[in-house]
Amino acid sequence: LRDSSVIAHEVPLPTLLFMGAKLAWAPSGNLLATCSRDKSVWVWEGESRSLQVDWEPPDTPLRVRDRVGSWVPFFFSPTVDEEDEYECVSVLNSHTQDVKHVVWHPSQEVRFSWAWWCMPLGLLSLFPQLLASASYDDTVKLYREEEDDWVCCATLEGHESTVWSLAFDPSGQRLASCSDDRTVRIWRQYLPGNEQGVACSGSDPSWKCICTLSGFHSRTIYDIAWCQLTGALATACGDDAIRVFQEDPNSDPQQPTFSLTAHLHQAHSQDVNCVAWNPKEPGLLASCSDDGEVAFWKYQRPEGL
Amino acid sequence: MQPPGAAQQPRIMEEKALEVYDLIRTIRDPEKPNTLEELEVVSESCVEVQEINEEYLVIIRFTPTVPHCSLATLIGLCLRVKLQRCLPFKHNLEIYISEGTHSTEEDINKQINDKQRVANGL
């Protein structure tokens, strides 16, 4: 990192972010979501569209404590004359307990390319940005933009304990959630007027649980990652193992079945907290653990699947 | 006639359970000058150690002295920290308050088994 060029600026956040706060960039790059133990989700909008950054090697660690002693994240900002600002556009208080994870829907990129400026306003509504959050209150919530604010447009209930993490599939039609209840649930989006007759309220899509993977994990599942290249689903578990699931070919889209195609027993010597698929190289998986190690894995889809 | 190896496993777990109990019995109650053992918050029989796939699972069921939420979670936290720091063998830990001892036992059990909350000091 020494030769990279990145300047880190601290942007004071008018909020208290507890340890364990998470954040996520939207695909557009100009929206940021943060969540924490204070049960809320914050949506931030940055002024600048460009994210070219310069960095000088810092002497201090990447995170700093704010004036009341809590950790705040560093924001990278471009080297321009004016100071870039991130403005909080919404505080979402829908969850009743700690929010463990936030993730953005992988919206189509077309909205956020140079063509954005030429698009008629009507078309913009076809690509709404969608945000999802997972909580200690056992639910998943979805949020979308409404005029200048953000609203909760769906609550997914079904897990019997804390939902720790979420991942959208490559199409954005399905969402996977993982939980302290040791299951993975797959949810599918149904638009108003759908063929399957799933009821929707107003113009908001409905989300229904179409698959539950149970009996595979012996402890809390802390993270889940859905490969955007291959569709493989990886989980990080408190039993120190990493598992990979693949959807069975010819499985019914409304009631899909997934098979366990890889089980890395003792992938780490302690809880696996996080797994992530490389966005360019199929099958390359990174994981990290309470044991302080980061590991890299090469996954290959078994023959016949 | 049991195969020679079979009788050994339960013994190992009893020894391990005693190791765990020896560590937790001397923890002092947050409110009183007595140990958890003296107050009967923990006892030898409240510790169970299972061996699953070459890993040890330690299960502790304790009885809080008073039906007060924050003290029960504090005891749970003390148990977890003590074992994390002092237990010499690698283990997974589950802590529960004994059934029927508390009106919100499910809430407490969920809290003390959430490692992020425990790390934050609940």
Image: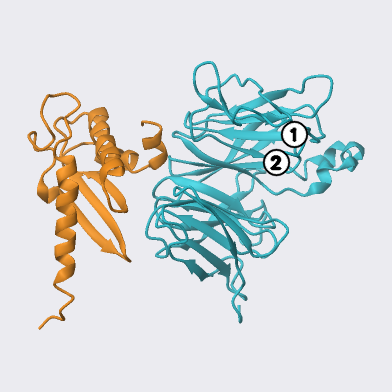
Colour scheme of the rendered structure: by chain
Q: CA distance from mark 2 to mark 1?
A: 9 Å
Shade representing chain A: cyan
CA neighbours of label 1 inside 10 A, class few (<14), some (14 to 19), many (20+)? some
Secondary element at image label 2: loop
The structure residue drawn at horizontal position 69% and vertical position 64%, both measured from the top left corner, is A282
**Foreground: B72 or B77?**
B77
CA neighbours of label 2 inside 10 A, class few (<14), some (14 to 19), many (20+)? few
Q: Is residue A156 above or below residue A209?
A: above
The structure residue drawn at horizontal position 26% and vertical position 37%, both measured from the top left corner, is B76
On-image quarter of the C terminus of chain A: bottom right
Sequence-first tag of 2 and 1: 2
Residue under label 1, please give it. Answer: A6
The verdict on a common chain for dots 2 and 1 is yes
Q: Chain of mark 1?
A: A
Three-letter code for the amino acid on which mark 2 is drawn? Leu
Chain letter, colour orange in render = B
Q: Quadrant of residue A232?
A: bottom right
- Across and down, in percent, residue A74 comes to 64, 29
Q: Chain of mark 2?
A: A
Q: Nearer the viewer, mark 2 or mark 1?
A: 2
Residue under label 2, please give it. Answer: A1
Task: Report the side of A199 relative to A45 (left or right).
Answer: left
Task: Report the side of A204 relative to B44 (left or right).
Answer: right
- Across and down, in percent, residue B81 comes to 30, 38
Q: Is residue A146 above or below residue A1?
A: above
Are dots 2 and 1 in contact, CB under 8 Å?
yes
- Across and down, in percent, residue A64 comes to 57, 25
